[in-house]
Image (cartoon, helix red, strand yellow):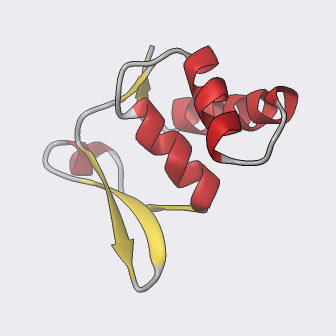
């Protein structure tokens, strides 16, 4: 899985947001605010990795068990899919 091209993560006034750039701004209006773990997962999916890799990386970065990490990543992936932000 990989984040589609045309989206940039930026820190604005202490908040981490994702905004569309270029052609993507025609299809997606607005921005998405990310918390710390969502920002970490976003960065993971900027590279073409598997969900299992992301779970492993999240458990290494945060004090969280694999089951919780998987559940959180699944929820985040669903949000990405519903906004058409991810390639599978």
Looking at the image, which is closer to me, 27 or 54?
Answer: 54
The answer, for residue 24, to whether it is visible in the render is: yes
Residue at left offset 57%, top offset 34%:
82
Above or below — where is 5 with respect to 37?
above
Residue at left offset 45%, top offset 18%:
49
In the rendering, at what x and y percent does residue 63 appear? 78, 47
Looking at the image, which is closer to me, 40 or 20?
Answer: 40
Residue at left offset 62%, top offset 44%:
61
In the rendering, at what x and y percent does residue 12 appear? 37, 78
Q: Is residue 54 left or right of residue 11?
A: right
Q: Is residue 53 left or right of residue 12?
A: right
Residue at the left extreme of this rendering: 22
Q: Is residue 68 left or right of residue 31?
A: right
The answer, for residue 84, to whether it is visible in the render is: no
Q: Is residue 26 left or right of residue 18?
A: left
Residue at left offset 37%, top offset 19%:
48
In the rendering, at what x and y percent does residue 2 appear? 39, 24
Looking at the image, which is closer to me, 28 or 7?
Answer: 7
Looking at the image, which is closer to me, 3 or 23?
Answer: 3
Which image quadrant: the C terminus? Answer: top left
Q: How many marks?
A: 0
Q: Quadrant of residue 3 in the image?
A: top left
Which image quadrant: the N terminus? Answer: top left
């Amino acid at each position: 899985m990989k984040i589609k091209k045309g989206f940039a993560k930026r820190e604005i006034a202490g908040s981490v947001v994702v905004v569309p750039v270029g052609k993507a701004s025609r299809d997606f209006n607005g921005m998405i605010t990310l918390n710390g773990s969502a920002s970490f997962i976003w960065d993971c999916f900027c590279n073409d990795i598997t969900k299992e890799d992301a779970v492993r990386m999240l458990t290494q970065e945060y004090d969280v068990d694999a089951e919780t990490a998987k559940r959180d990543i699944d929820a985040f992936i669903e949000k990405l899919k519903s906004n058409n932000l991810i390639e599978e």
